[in-house]
Image (cartoon, rainbow, N blue to C red):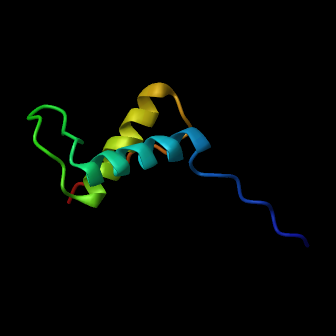
Amino acid sequence: MAKKAKKRKYSKGAAKKVGRAMKKRKSGTLKSGRSGKKVKSRKQAIAIGLSEARKKGAKVPKKRRRKKS
């Protein structure tokens, strides 16, 4: 049996948004939403890029929900 081809989890548009957020972080101009503080964390920059992509309607998986313990 042939393996099923995997589809992209993230669209090209989402990848561009994340790339742009990473560049802004490197140059020191990326700021967080409410507080407006400079973003230094790589993970936070990725999260900002993905949330912008979601707002634009790009193909991005839904946010993970934490299990209640």
Which residue is drawn at the image coordinates 72% and 59% (left, top)?
A: 6
Which residue is drawn at the image coordinates 89% and 70% (left, top)?
A: 2
In this view, the residue farthest toward the top is 56
Judge from the rendering whether residue 54 lies leftward or rightward of residue 41; answer left or right. right
Say if 34 sits above or below 69 in the image: above
Query: Quadrant of the image for the C terminus?
Result: bottom left
> Where does residue 35 sit, x and y in percent of width and height?
8, 35
Say if 16 sits above or below 46 in the image: above
Total tally of numbered discs in the picture: 0
> Could you tell me if residue 66 is visible in this image?
no
Judge from the rendering whether residue 61 lies leftward or rightward of residue 20; answer left or right. right
In this view, the residue farthest toward the bottom is 1
Say if 54 sits above or below 40 in the image: above
> Where does residue 63 sit, x and y in percent of width and height?
38, 45
Say if 18 sits above or below 33 in the image: below
* 67 or 41, nearer to the observer: 41
Which residue is drawn at the image coordinates 13% and 31% (left, top)?
A: 34
Query: Quadrant of the image for the N terminus?
Result: bottom right
> Where does residue 52 sit, x and y in percent of width and height?
39, 34
In this view, the residue farthest toward the right is 1
> Where does residue 59 sit, x and y in percent of width and height?
56, 38
> Could you tell me if residue 29 is visible in this image?
yes
Which residue is drawn at the image coordinates 45% and 35% (left, top)?
A: 53
